[in-house]
Image (tube, grey):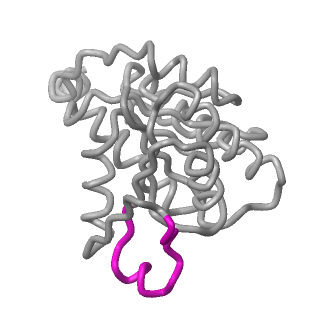
Amino acid sequence: MKRICVFCGSSPGTKQEYLEMARALGSALVERGIGLVYGGGKLGMMGEIARSVFQQGGDVIGVIPRSLFEKEVAFNDLPDLRVVNSMHERKALMADLADGFIALPGGLGTIEEFFEVLTWAQLGIHRKPCGLLNVCGYYDDLIRFVRHAVAHQFVRETDGQLVLMDAQPAGLLEQMLAYSPPHVDKAAWALELSQA
């Protein structure tokens, strides 16, 4: 695994543990020789993980849309900061550059980005691991929702298992390094349910 894309908030959140875990994830990536791909910002969780990797000599690629770059929220000290024209381009490039995806705590954008790559995994568009770093139980309710969707047969049980989760960076990274993607046949599953 060469690079992991990390989705996270441009806010620091309400708990000091969120920023501490962003730094810890950065250190864990550097220790394993794994580069960081992220949204290119200098604020909040985004800035914290980027600084952590950058200051320890790790590889960081920031990808930011021009509209945000022009608002001066970019981490301009990065040697590899890529400015793109839209949010769609940003997400596509981040996905292409990464061998896996992790969501730290964040808001609507973080959730949307994570669920998009998770949906791509469900559809077999990519076979990369997708993990939640569940800092202070931040994602507990999200996991409950996924289980709820499985129970109501809107998500296959195997697709619910696509979400890797741990409260510590080392544990999550070990899961990602050992990840073996399941066989994907969503069409057959949907047909089976419709005939039941």
Near-viewer residue (100 or 125): 100
Range covered by the magenta-colored residues? 63-77
Residue 64 is covered by the magenta coloring: yes
Q: Is 185 above or below relative to 104?
A: above
Residue 99: x %, y % from top left: 34, 33
On screen, residue 84 above or below 16: below
Residue nearer the viewer, 70 or 160? 70
Q: Quadrant of residue 44?
A: bottom right
Q: Residue at x 61, y 31 (%)?
A: 28
**Residue found 50% across the figure and 53% down from its top:** 111
- Is the C terminus in the top left, top right, bottom left or bottom right quadrant? top left
Q: In the image, residue 14 lies at what x, y percent?
A: 81, 61
Residue 182 is a magenta residue: no
In the picture shown, does residue 47 fall above or below 28?
Answer: below
Rendered residue at 43%/44% (across/down): 5
When asked about the image quadrant of residue 27, the answer is top right
Farthest residue toward the bottom?
71
In this orientation, which residue lies closer to the viewer: 194 or 38?
Answer: 38
Above or below 14: residue 32: above
> Which quadrant holds the N terminus?
top left
Q: Position of residue 53 (x, y in %)?
A: 57, 46
